[in-house]
Amino acid sequence: MNVAVPHTPEPALLLIELGLIVVGLATLGRLAHRFGFSTVPLYLVAGLAFGTGGLAPVASSHEFVRVGGEIGVLLLLFMLGLETPADRLAAQMKTTAPAGLADLLLNFIPGFGAALALGWGLPAAALLGGITWVSSSGVAAKVLSEAGRLDAPETPVVLAILVMEDLAMAVFLPVASWAMSDGGASRAPLRLVVTLAVVALALVLAFRSRGAVAKLVSHRSDEVVMFTALGLMLLVAGLAQRFQVSSAVGAFVLGISLSGPVARRAGGLLGPLRDLFAAMFFLFFGLQIDPSTLGPVLLPAAGLCVVTTFTKLATGWYAASRAQLDRTARWRAGAALVARGEFSIALAGLGLAAGARTELGTLAAAYVLLTAIVGPLLARRS
């Protein structure tokens, strides 16, 4: 009997590719710091250049970069949670709730209307509305970290909006999946109830843990602290994904439940890992896009990018004004929300798997790429 053996890249080629990738990321980082702008657009364009249909597609290290990218977005959100006291976030979410509703209306309608204008039908229109609605938590976390604005007055406002969007996606994704299957997914209502229960339980545990997670992570050895924090993050994120909740939400909730000196210690130990794997996340995103498919959808994607950049700026302005922040902080809050990312791509993938038009995936890829470039540039200028 013949047994299929999975292809394993040659170790030498894998090491050479990874070495070139890391050195290339370092070079891009030097350029970004030299000219004073975010590294995110450079990483995205590099992925575009060396991905499918690019100049020299990477092959041996593709799977490593994919897994590294998944870990990267988890580390970004986990460490963002470490910087956010649970009580402060809870209070901010209450204040920002009306802005969350405005966020939905301002940013869902452009995508929904565009899909209807293109004749794609209601299910695809709902998906494109979701794609233009939800900001990228990963890009926002990277922008706030790069700019040294984790303690800025507008950061809790941005986090409250992002958390509300991510929690809304925990509901939106199962509903969208059910709608795309014409209601054929008989277990979708049960899955939705389980999702809501898991999200509610996770938030209650995070806000009322009272140092329990910190006691679990704390140890006199830095090595033990780092391994425990990293292992718990991966475990919680995996369980969250298993229950159809965003793994990024799971990592963020764990981060806010970890408080005190041990949180600062874990943040210092995991910082270098976050920088490496976050770069992998943005690089891998660019690797998945074939440049040759972008031409036909570039104009509608650019139009959506322009419209929803202004609507996200308005969202941030309104949310920060409710927190009584000054004009500069309001602009910065809006700019941090402009980029779309992981959820937008997930929604496009859901539509394609359910038989939606292929243009939906291509348009989503072009749109996310444009906003992920424009967002960090605006945030830097603001």
Image: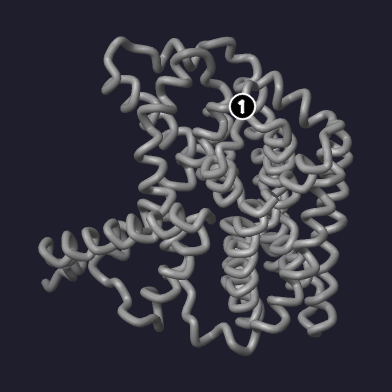
Residue farthest toward the front in the current orientation of the protein: 34
Whole-percent x and y of residue 26?
Answer: 33, 55
Mark 1 Cα within 10 Å, few/some/many (few <14, many 20+)? many
**Viewer-side residue, 342 vs 316:** 316
Say left or right for 292 vs 365: left
Q: Quadrant of the N terminus?
A: bottom left
Q: Position of residue 109 (x, y in %)?
A: 85, 64
The answer to which quarter of the image holds residue 253 is top right
Q: Is residue 95 left or right of residue 89?
A: right
Q: Which residue is located at x 65 percent, y 52 percent?
A: 379
**Element under label 1?**
loop
* Rendered residue at 59%/39% (across/down): 249
Residue 27: x and y, percent?
34, 59
Q: Residue at x 84, y 82 (%)?
A: 117
Q: Which residue in the protein does label 1 denote?
A: 84
* Amino acid type, mark 1: Thr
Which residue is found at the position 44% from the left and 33% from the top? 233
Q: How many marks?
A: 1
Q: Position of residue 297 (x, y in %)?
A: 65, 84
Q: How is the image coloured?
A: one colour
Q: Is residue 188 above or below residue 213?
A: below
Residue 349 lies in what quarter of the image? bottom right
Question: Residue 226 is drawn in which quadrant?
Answer: top left
Is residue 75 visible from the viewing direction of this image? yes
Q: Is residue 247 visible?
A: no
